[in-house]
Image: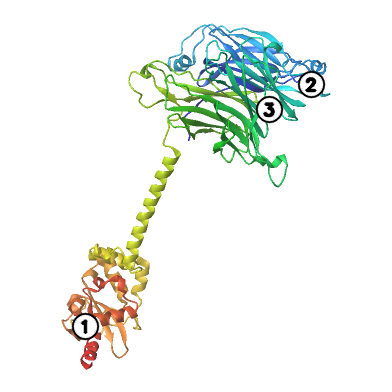
Amino acid sequence: MSSPVAEAKIKLSYPIYAADFDPYNSSFLLVGGGGGEGRSGIPNKITLLNASKKNELSEFVDIELSRDEDSVTSLAIAQSTETWATAFAGINSSTKDQQAGKNEHLRSFLLEYPQRRKTGTEGLASEKKPATKSTETPKGETKALGKASLFKPSKAAKKETFQRVLRLSKKKKENGPRLGAVATGLAPAGEIVLFGADTSRPGPKDIWSRIQLDDKEEAADVDITELEPRESEEGVRFRVAYCTDYKVYITDVDDKTKDNGCLCQNIYSLPQSDTSASSKLRPRLRCLRFITPQLLVVLQNNPQGKGAELFLLEISGIATLRKVLRRKIKSATALSITRLDASTPSEIDQHVIAVAGADSSITILTLDRFTSSPRGKLKFRSHTFLPSVHPTSITSLAFSTFIPPTTNWKDTPPQYVKLASTSIANTCVVHTLPLSPYPSPPKPDSPARYLLVSPGRSTMTQNSISMLVALFAIAIAAFFLQAFTEIRGGTPEYLGVKQWLPDTVHDLIARPYMFEDAASTAITTPLSKVSEAAETPIQVVKSAASKAQEKLGLRALLSQRNIGSDTSDNANHAIIVRHEDEENSLSAELRHPSQLVEGEHNAKRWEELQKHEKEAWKKRLSDAGEWAIDEGESVLKGIFFSGLGAAVGAAAGGG
């Protein structure tokens, strides 16, 4: 999930509440905030920052605001050229003016850019060049353009209403109209005002429509998208979506049918708990953004600090795909989305999403929409998690606008998208996210599509492959388990594995494994009652170098012979198993070949025994726990047997 992300950070002299990039140049970032009205000593300001370098932020322009008025609560760049830009800001009038029923909350400013203005790509590329001495870049100038009051005057005794939300639509055409929306905060009755934003001094005359909310209801967030014009119809249409704590609404407006009211449709409501109507037990909607005119992404905080999640909402009211954020994120405070446009039609439409957590973390993910699918197949994909970006809570997030290059991909410099975040700790941080061409490499002599995360397999395909791999692994494990238990004699022979294996391999598996320390202990344990350290009763060749062996268990002698094969000549010794008729007991001895005499006490190799003798010995050894049927006869080959055969033969003759 992690990815190399360059970070630039700056600390200003005031708390920062809002930020916005120049839509045509990501080298310029506008931020605003302040200490509000009073004598706190903290100024109210709007600052234009130079964000052209990946690892450094610097100040271009400062707009000093009155300390007798409120701080900046919302901010957006309305118009932009190569030499200047206009910006709208939410700033409350002084308390005295508000009590008098006058609150000019919407302000506009003109910012003149410095003369030598670099584009975002030039600024990033310049970092690779050696530093050269140059004169200081001339700073631009700023000027206040206008003040306006778009909200209806409040009749409440306590005047606390402020401009909580400011949202502007994105321009699809160079000279097309632009719609703006402002929403109240702390108002007795919430209100959203839609106005024409293609002017530098918006006022009451530019209002398109008003949306009145219910008592004690506020708009948590607002977003606007432009609709395609209908056939044989002039003008521009917009779709507006807003959410309260528990509901989502949409409405359509156009520049030809402006009025002072519009009909909003409630398309989604959070379910209420059946056990309690307490708001503490209900999730809350925090932010929303358009993906397409028919699809929204909504940020929801779960009750009692139990996390946050994103979900997709169709305008028909159906909530579809969901993405739960990390468990450590108790709630979310901000959301920003940017679309990675393509210069030519593409099979994939990718949006980059950033979510700020209450723990000052930022989660970055993508939403892929595959346009080749009939309904546009959708998939969330995690990209990066940035912990503790700021010392305190994040107040705003803002993505730069990605403008796709039209030149050949080989001649195009590295492409990036930037993410700015601010906090009340006076800090602003800009992360630069590198983009990759898609497909990689693109077709020769054609512009590349740039994405943050290359699309992978679909969720259904990935799940199917994972399931097949798991089933295959289970089948292999079951096969080997069945084969092993068949060799050990634990189950009937369905596979017939014994017939596939050579005797040597079969014997290794069929004979129980004995650890060295267990074998050495077993060596001192006789098969039946035998006196410890007893001399071998048969010594046909007397030699000082050869001494009698103790009577030991058959399994122990086999282990002794195998264990000692690398360090002694035990492997050349013979094992004799005897049956004592008088005591009806078994004993096993390990003898050197020089101590053996053919036919001694009718001692015969296993291979020399008759069938009825073998059956008798197998039964006797099995009863004594020294041999099992599943071990096979191969483990008995080469062992001498004495005593039991005569008794069996006599019994057979008598019968």
Q: What residue is drawn where x is 62% and y is 7%?
A: 141
Q: Which mark is residue 150?
A: none
Q: Which image quadrant for residue 50?
A: top right
Image disc number at residue 539: 1
What residue occupies the far bottom of the structure in this picture? 654
Q: Residue 363, percent across and down?
A: 55, 33
Which quarter of the image is occupied by the C terminus? Answer: bottom left
403 to 453, vertically: above or below? above
220 vs 7, nearest the viewer: 220
Sequence order check, earlier mark of 2 and 3: 2
Chain-order first, disc 1 or disc 3? 3
Front one among 457 and 21: 457
Mark 2 element type: loop
Q: CA distance from mark 2 to mark 3?
A: 17 Å
Residue holding disc 2 = 154
Give residue 288's position: percent from left, percent from top: 60, 29
Is label 1 in contact with label 2 (beta carbons under 8 Å)?
no
Given the image, on which type of amino acid does mark 1 rest? Gln
Within the image, what quadrant is residue 517 found in? bottom left
Seen from the viewer's position, the closer of residues 526 and 243 is: 243
Kindly identify the residue that appears in the image at 32 percent across and 80 percent down: 533
